[in-house]
Amino acid sequence: MDRRTFVLGAGAAFLAQAAPSDQFNLGIIGPGSRGQFLMKTFAEMGPVRFEGVCDVYEPNLEQGLSIAKGATAYRNYKALLDNKSIQAVIIATPEHWHHQMLLDAISAGKDVYIEKPLCQTPEQGVELMKAVRNSRSIVQVGMQRRSYDLFLKARDIHAAGTLGLVRLVRSWWINYSLSQPPAEKLEGLLDWEQWQGPAPRRPFDPNRFRNWRGYKDYSGGIVADQGAHVYDGIHLIRGVGFPAAVIATGGKVHQAKADTPETVVVAAEYPEDFLGIFTINYAGMRYPSRLDQLNQFDGEAARMDVARESLNVYLQAEPEKPAINATGSFGAATAAHIRNFLDCARTRTQPNATVERAFQAALVIQMANRSMETGRRVRWNHEALSVEV
């Protein structure tokens, strides 16, 4: 069977399953705060129906079921995946579960919308790329800048040559997280053993559950959580993919009980003779969200500043007044991203944020973390698909 026949066959099977109402049957794994937001946004896209809700923390499960009226409750995600009526799953769990859950979901024949970062290690990313290529599943990773009209406009401005040759992007994301005290207790029941899953076994600690992004066992730190977004935006606009090398340095850890730094500087080198610099500081001044991040594309002819909700291009001839300016609504980006996923699931075409693109962004931060661990510049061997220190 050639690829065209295969794709058309998969699409026909999907449409037959969805007929006659074209309703899309969904399940969600991890209806926490982000998961509940995704559920509500998916429901607005219609026609969709939540057939299953799964969580190992009872309050989250109850909240998810309150949104998905009539859905079946699951306390083990594999049981949800066994439900043949579910066509696609949303994976909105902590980062340490993404790799295995995505493998299991595509093995079950589901389409998948999965939150970023895609995975924790380069080895996991390589395995996921190969697995998705060999599956029938449509997989969209939740890097919504790839469906955001403002970032797509920035991509087009760069592609048109307006900036000239861009050899450097300077980006930053500033916030403040040190005022939050460690969690000392949980309201409601949690299956701690299931929640740990593939992570190392630790004694139960409410703070590990509530603030998992601060622990290496469950994430790449805040630099990974936000850096995946930032580098994916840089890759989209600049038109690059896998890095050639990465070097990074981090400050001390100030958050109580955590073991990942709040302040990190990352420098990524690309084969296209281009550097992407990212600074994150979650021990700085707290800005309004629309002002908390910026990407500056330094071209030979112009500079383009792309923030969360604004875009400005400054020409060399008049560097203090924007020659091009635009605004956007970041709140609409997720809805556009979900709409793209549903459209692609129905047409069996590739979505905006494929697993390969998601891995390229996650890989930069994974290499940055290895650089901080080893104190060395880390290289990517694209032929071998492996990291070299």
Image: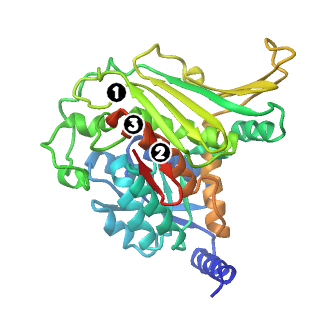
Residue kind at label 3, given as amino acid type: Ser
Which residue is more in the foreground, 75 or 277?
277
Residue 166 horizontal/vertical position (percent): 72, 32
Do the residues under discs 1 and 3 have CB atoms within 8 angstroms?
Answer: no
Residue 275 placement, left or right of 156: left
The quadrant of the image that shows the N terminus is bottom right
Give the CA distance from mark 2 to mark 3: 10 Å
Q: Earlier in the sequence, mark 1 or mark 3?
A: 1
Query: Dot 1 lies on which element?
Result: loop
Question: How far apart are labels 1 and 3 at the CA level?
Answer: 14 Å
* Closer to the camera in the image, 98 or 35: 98
Position of the C terminus, as image quadrant, is top left
Nearest the camera: 251 or 156? 251
Mark 2 and mark 3 lie on one chain; the one further toward the N terminus is 3
Q: Which mark is residue 379?
A: 2
Circle 3 crowding by C-alpha within 10 Å: few under 14, some 14–19, many from 20: many
The reply to whether residue 188 is in sight is yes
Q: Secondary structure at mark 3?
A: helix
Residue 28 drawn at (x, y percent): 42, 57
Q: Nearer the viewer, mark 2 or mark 1?
A: 2
Residue 184: % across, % down: 18, 29
Q: Which residue is mark 1?
A: 261
Report the residue marked by disc 3. 371
Q: Residue furthest right?
A: 317
